Amino acid sequence: MNKAILGKKLGMTQLFDETGKIVPVTVVEAGPCVVSQVKTVENDGYEAVQVGFCDLKEKHTNKPMKGHFEKAGISAKKYLKEFKLENAASMNVGDEIKVDVFAAGDKVDITGTSKGKGFQGAIKRWGAHRGPMAHGSGYHRGAGSMGACSSPSRVYKGKKLAGHMGTDTVTIQNLDVVSVDAEKNLLLVRGAIPGPKGGLVIVKNAVKC
């Protein structure tokens, strides 16, 4: 059965297993998520549910989104995502998806947005080598050769150059769920996950386990 939920990365800590070994875990505030729309084959050509996460003040929403939430009869949400769940047809607008859909021992895939590093050079961004650092060298931390001049008279696509680093969509697969706290909506996952503290993450059941 396909399972998915939206969450917020809170940070990392550690637990001790039965043998006394330290287990590094990431704490995720997962849900509760509210179903804001149900997609059907008759209306949309496929089955899916749109869920909202994290309450938002109405003054921070525009008119179209305000009408969308009022039609669903739910409070304004900061994040909206669509999931193709196997039981999508049986779900209704207003239903809640809570963290207890997962249990300790489950394998999950977590998707988040990596930390932004700003504009970086080729050495930090791609691990390029430096030029000679002697005084006579006219090249130290450049991007290197751009290729031949007369042919092809251009820089090939894929050349590793300086640019915006980070803020990429990253998915970590086959992470173990160590513990689930249904009362506090907390999901403890073994290992690290992408993104900063407070960043949005998508937790799904693993597809390659």
Image: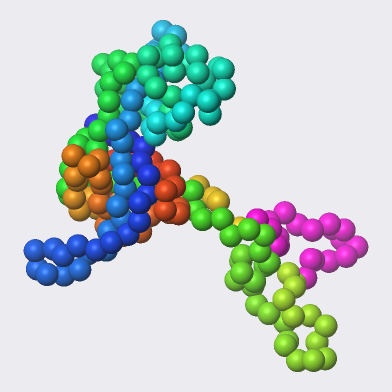
Q: Is residue 149 magenta?
A: yes
Magenta-tinted stretch: 145-164
Give the residue displayed 56% in from the left and 55% down from the top.
116
Q: Name the quadrant containing residue 55.
A: top left
Q: In the orientation shown, which residue stands out farthest toward the left?
A: 18
Q: Is residue 36 above or below residue 115?
A: above
Report the side of 161 relative to 148 (left or right). Answer: left
Q: Position of residue 167 (x, y in %)?
A: 55, 51
Q: Name the quadrant containing residue 64.
A: top right
Work out whether residue 64 or residue 121 is closer to the camera in this orientation and state it.
Answer: 64
Q: Position of residue 43 (x, y in %)?
A: 44, 9
Q: Is residue 45 visible?
A: no
Q: Position of residue 138 (x, y in %)?
A: 83, 83
Report the side of 153 relative to 205 (left or right). Answer: right
Q: Position of residue 39 (x, y in %)?
A: 40, 16
In the picture, which quadrant includes the N terminus? top left
Work out whether residue 42 or residue 12 is closer to the camera in this orientation and state it.
Answer: 12
Report the side of 195 relative to 27 (left or right). Answer: right
Give the residue displayed 90% in from the left and 63% down from the top.
150
Looking at the rendered structure, the number of numbered marks drawn on it comes to 0
Q: Is residue 78 above or below residue 58?
A: below
Work out whether residue 123 or residue 199 is closer to the camera in this orientation and state it.
Answer: 199
Give the dominant element type of the magenta stretch: helix, strand or loop.
Answer: loop
